[in-house]
Image (cartoon, grey):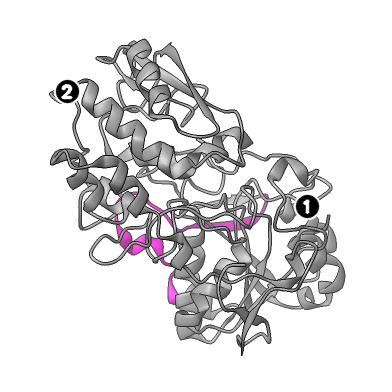
Amino acid sequence: MQLGIDVFLTAHRDRLQGARIGLLTNYASFTANGKRNIDAMLEVGGWQSLTIFGPEHGYWGAVQYMEPDNDGSYRSIPIRSLYDGTSGYALFPEPKDIASLDYLLVDLQDIGARYYTFYASMANCMEVAATAGVEVVVLDRPNPLNGNVMEGNLLRPPFIAFVGQYPIPNRHGMTIGELALWLNRTIGCKLEIVQMQGWRRAQWWDETGLEWTHPSPNIPTFDTAVVYPGLCLLEGTNLSEGRGTTRPFELFGAPWLDPFRLSDALNDVGLGGVRFDPFYAIPTFHKHAGQRCGMARITVTDREAFQPVRAGLWVIKVARDLDPEKFAWDPKMYEWANCAAIDALAGTIGFRSAIDLEQDFAAFADAYDQSSTFEKVELEAYADGGPRLRTSGRQDRNGIAVPEASA
């Protein structure tokens, strides 16, 4: 397999010569043979200048969400932070920094979930690039959760935040290059996608032969990424989502919960492809730090049958019903949302209402999934075997066929 960075540094390396380049990336972006992208670019050389732009958690992934990260450098290459933890102002690059470039490269490992903010940083850079007349070149990478399956609702105003800026499903089924093409239908910047060679839509990360490079502080393993599109919803509650433990998003609970009752109740829901087991843990930071928490551990037994978003909805519902008096929605400012954190994550007030008003929750969970109505972009180069994708007959500005709907 050749990633976008590999293709760019071979087939497009002449574009580096004498150029003023920006690179939106972080520490986890490597070539297919395990070399960090910046080091690979340093070996090729030839540019006039290079500036790195770092997304949430900082270039080095050293800080948690809503925490500031300072500018720094990689060897002698300056790093500009696009997330200072204090203001939405910093989520966009300075227009003068983009206008000084010949083009902006994007090389980030997305994990396939709406809340994962790397694609939002890319979108914000595309917005600035559109106003400055600067080309954006996205070096594509796999969707670790495969490129076929989608799940979740389509958020709408006013439930907008950095964890949900656009109406895409919670699990969106696109690569970061395809996301860029979808976003550019409204942004309208000059955009090029450097496609991968050898990746197919049906592939999960562990079928690519690539090493998992821990793309952000709380996604340490591929197993974490599989459950993240649903379990991230716990960030909008006073339940620990496992931050501060060795298994974030795979462990969840609170000091007042009985882990046996919690896991038994969740197993009784009858969710497909998953098992819940009782657990105790003491988070070292974040929610309930230093307190012994009754938790459940989620184990995916059949990832093809597992629906992470549905599981996340039910985890919160069940945990709340076990002790409604101690359960609470998180009231703090969250990722510059103008609504409750849970509403920003869920993309609706309907989820919170279904729980607080004790409505028919099974019916709500069924209706929540609107992914079949979402028209995503799929690059034909990544098509699985069989017929070519149906397209609408339209092409985007790069001459890439636009599908009628997800195939």
The amino acid type found where label 1 is placed reads: Thr
Give yes or no for residue 85 being in the magenta stretch: yes
Count the marks: how many?
2
369 lies left or right of 130:
left
Does residue 82 sit above or below 341 in this rendering? below
Q: Name the residue under label 1.
A: 31
Residue 374 location (% of width, % of height): 47, 68
Residue 306 location (% of width, % of height): 54, 38
Q: At 80% across and 43% down in the image, what residue appears?
A: 209
Residue 317 location (% of width, % of height): 28, 33
The amino acid type found where label 2 is placed reads: Lys
Q: At 32% across and 50% down in the image, what residue appears?
A: 346
Quarter residue 331 falls in: top left
Residue 263 location (% of width, % of height): 40, 18
Q: What number is the disc on residue 384? A: none
Quarter residue 161 falls in: bottom left
Does residue 259 sit above or below 386 in this rendering? above
User: As rendered, which of 93 and 215 lies closer to the eye?
Assistant: 215
Q: Name the residue under label 2.
A: 326
- Distance, label 1 to label 2, CA atoms, is 47 Å
| Secondary structure found at label 2 | loop
Mark 1 neighbour density, 10 Å: few (under 14) some (14–19) many (20 or more):
many
Mark 2 neighbour density, 10 Å: few (under 14) some (14–19) many (20 or more):
some
- Quadrant including the C terminus: bottom right
350 lies left or right of 335:
left
Of callouts 1 and 2, which one flags the residue occurring earlier in the amino acid sequence?
1
Does residue 179 sit above or below 335 in this rendering? below
Q: At 20% across and 39% down in the image, what residue appears?
A: 355
User: As rendered, which of 375 and 155 lies closer to the eye?
Assistant: 375
Do we see residue 23 in this rendering?
A: no
In the image, the segment drawn in magenta is 75-96
